[in-house]
Image (cartoon, rainbow, N blue to C red):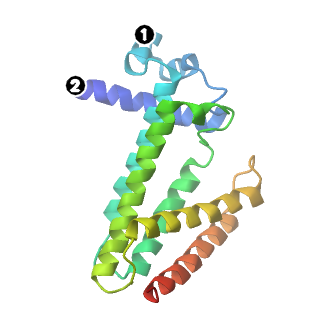
C-alpha cells in the first residue's frame, strides 16, 4: 500500500512539472508516462483519465497549502498578525504554482461537475478555516461580529480580487516579477489592516 501511494504521488509530481512547463491543455497522459518512464497501464491504474489526474493535482496543491497554513497558525497571536502570516503562505503558493493555471487552455474544465464539486469542497474548507480564525478573534474580544463565516468569505474574496488585479496588470502570459508580488502582498496586508479595524468597530 505504501509503495502504491508513493507511485501515485510520483505521478502527481510529474504531472505538476509537465503542466507548469507545457500547460494542461497541451499535456497528454502519454507525455506524463514517457516523462516518468512508466507504462500506460500503470499510469491508468492510478488515474483512469486525465480528469482524475487533474483532480489529484488540485488535491495535492490544496493539501500542501493547508498543511503549511495550519503549521504557521498560532491562535495566541493578534488577529492581524495571524492574517499577515496566512497572506505570506498564500503568496508563496501563488508564486510556486502560478504557471499551473488549472483552467488554462481547457475552457470547459470548470464546467465538469466532478471538478467543480472538488474545487467547491476545497474552497469551503479554506472558508471554514478562516471562519475559525475570526471566531477565535471574537472570543478574544479582538473583533465584534457574529457572522464569522460571512466575514471569512468576504475577506478571502477581497484577497482574491487583489490577486486577480496583479495577474491582469502583468499579463496572463508573463510571470509576475518580485516587485509585482511584493506590491500585491503589501496591498493585501494594507487591506487586512483596514478590514480588521472595521471589525473592531462593528455593531
Q: Is residue 175 visible?
A: yes
Disc 1 from disc 2: Cα separation = 18 Å
Packing grade of label 2 (10 A; few <14, some 14-19, many >=20) is few
Determine whether 113 is above or below 157 in the image: above
> Mark 2 falls on what kind of element?
loop
Residue visible at 35% across and 26% down in the picture: 7
Q: Residue furthest front?
A: 203
User: Closer to the N terminus: mark 1 or mark 2?
Assistant: 2
Q: Which residue is painted at 43% across and 15% down in the image?
A: 44
Q: Classify residue 161 as left or right of residue 70.
A: right
Viewer-side residue, 203 vs 165: 203
When the figure is inspected, residue 134 is found, relative to residue 17, above or below; the finding is below
Q: Quadrant of the N terminus?
A: top left
Residue pointed to by mark 2: 1
Name the image quarter holding the C terminus. Answer: bottom left
Closer to the camera, 167 or 174?
A: 167
Seen at 36% across and 61% down, the residue is 129
Q: Residues within 10 Å of mark 1 (few under 14, many from 20)?
A: few
Q: Is 1 situated left or right of 100 in this image?
A: left
Residue 15 position within the rendered picture, expressed as x and y whole percent measured from the top left: 51, 31
| Residue in the foreground of this view, choosing between 29 and 123 | 123
User: Considering only vertical position in the picture, is 19 above or below 152?
Assistant: above
Q: Is residue 165 left or right of residue 55?
A: right
Question: Which numbered marker is on residue 41?
Answer: 1
Amino acid at each position: 500500500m505504501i509503495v502504491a501511494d508513493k507511485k501515485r504521488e510520483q505521478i502527481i509530481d510529474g504531472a505538476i512539472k509537465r503542466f507548469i512547463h507545457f500547460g494542461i491543455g497541451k499535456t497528454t497522459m502519454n507525455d506524463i508516462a514517457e516523462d516518468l518512464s512508466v507504462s500506460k497501464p500503470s499510469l491508468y491504474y492510478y488515474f483512469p483519465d486525465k480528469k482524475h489526474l487533474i483532480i489529484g493535482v488540485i488535491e495535492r496543491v490544496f493539501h500542501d497549502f493547508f498543511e503549511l497554513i495550519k503549521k504557521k497558525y498560532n491562535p495566541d497571536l493578534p488577529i492581524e498578525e495571524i492574517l499577515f502570516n496566512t497572506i505570506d503562505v498564500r503568496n508563496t503558493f501563488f508564486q510556486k504554482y502560478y504557471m499551473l493555471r488549472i483552467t488554462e487552455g481547457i475552457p470547459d474544465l470548470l464546467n465538469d461537475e466532478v471538478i467543480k464539486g472538488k474545487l467547491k469542497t476545497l474552497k469551503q474548507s479554506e472558508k471554514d478555516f478562516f471562519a475559525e480564525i475570526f471566531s477565535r478573534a471574537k472570543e478574544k474580544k479582538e473583533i465584534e461580529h457574529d457572522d464569522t463565516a460571512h466575514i471569512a468569505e468576504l475577506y478571502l474574496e477581497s484577497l482574491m480580487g487583489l490577486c486577480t488585479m496583479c495577474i491582469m496588470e502583468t499579463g496572463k502570459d508573463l510571470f509576475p516579477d518580485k516587485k509585482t508580488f511584493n506590491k500585491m502582498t503589501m496591498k493585501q496586508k494594507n487591506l487586512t489592516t483596514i478590514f480588521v479595524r472595521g471589525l473592531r468597530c462593528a455593531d
